[in-house]
């Protein structure tokens, strides 16, 4: 997830639905991100994430918000990571399109997420309701100057 997005020291990473915080912690510990923010609705997972961050020695560079990601301010992100269902990705697409700055990289793992987001942005579907979407590799892309999703991978 973090490798295809080429996370580095200049980045502020947002993981929407951050679970136990492993990706947020890895972003700062293993990829040197300036800061990483996890948004997670489950308070038990948020508490666990904070404890794991403390143990990993990165508590000062990570933030875990116990919040519905539909209500989160994602504008500061330079990288957004999503490991969610295809349906959730589709629901999130308009928010991301409206709020992320041009140049923000998005990476979505599995569950048809990347295609689903692109499809939502373009108003087309990638998978019919009865078609099973095969899991895909993590995919990343960057928002273009008009804040439209670019097809080009980098
Ligand atoms: C598959 S886990 C991904 C965990 C983490 N991103 C990772 O890569 O290890 C999805 C997480 O999204 C959280 N989630 C689902 N809906 C949410 C919402 N509306 N707001 C915040 N978190 C949500 C779930 O509680 C779950 O922990």
Image (tube, rainbow, N blue to C red):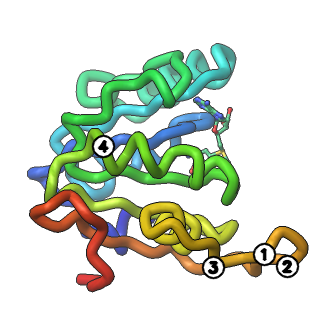
Q: Secondary structure at mark 4?
A: helix
Q: Position of residue 98 (x, y in %)?
A: 30, 43
Q: Quadrant of residue 8?
A: bottom left
Q: Which residue is mark 4?
A: 98
Give the CA separation, mark 3 to mark 4: 25 Å
Left or right side of 107 for 22: right
Q: Secondary structure at mark 3?
A: loop
Residue farthest front in this picture: 123
Up/down of 58 relative to 67, above or below:
below
Q: Which mark is residue 136?
A: 3
Give the CA separation, mark 1 to mark 4: 26 Å
Between disc 3 and disc 1, whose residue precedes? 1
Question: At 55% from the left edge and 23% from the top edge, which residue is drawn?
Answer: 68
Q: Which residue is mark 2?
A: 131
Up/down of 29 relative to 124, above or below:
above
Between disc 2 and disc 4, whose residue precedes? 4
Between disc 2 and disc 3, whose residue precedes? 2
Question: At 30% from the left edge and 38% from the top edge, which residue is drawn?
Answer: 36
Up/down of 41 relative to 141, above or below:
above
Q: Which mark is residue 128?
A: 1
Residue farthest right in this picture: 130
Give the CA separation, mark 2 to mark 4: 29 Å
Which class describes the residues within 10 Å of circle 3: few (<14), some (14-19), or many (20+)? some
- Which quadrant holds the N terminus? bottom left
Q: Position of residue 58 (x, y in %)?
A: 31, 31
Q: Which mark is residue 99?
A: none
* Total count of labels: 4
Q: Secondary structure at mark 2?
A: loop
Q: Quadrant of residue 77?
A: top left
Quadrant for ligand 1?
top right
Q: Position of residue 137 (x, y in %)?
A: 57, 79
């Amino acid at each position: 997830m973090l490798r295809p997005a080429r996370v580095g020291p200049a980045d502020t990473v947002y993981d929407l639905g951050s679970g136990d915080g492993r990706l947020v912690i890895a972003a700062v510990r293993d990829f040197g991100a300036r800061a990483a923010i996890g948004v997670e609705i489950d308070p038990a997972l948020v508490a666990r994430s904070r404890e794991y961050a403390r143990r990993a020695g990165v508590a000062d560079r990570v933030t875990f918000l116990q919040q519905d990601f539909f209500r989160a301010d994602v504008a500061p992100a330079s990288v957004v990571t999503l490991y969610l269902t295809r349906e959730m990705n589709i629901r999130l697409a308009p928010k991301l399109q409206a709020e992320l700055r041009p140049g923000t990289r998005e990476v979505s793992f599995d569950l048809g997420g990347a295609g689903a987001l692109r499809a939502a942005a373009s108003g087309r579907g990638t998978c019919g309701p009865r078609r099973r979407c095969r899991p895909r590799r993590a995919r990343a892309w960057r928002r273009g100057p008009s804040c439209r999703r670019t097809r080009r991978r980098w």
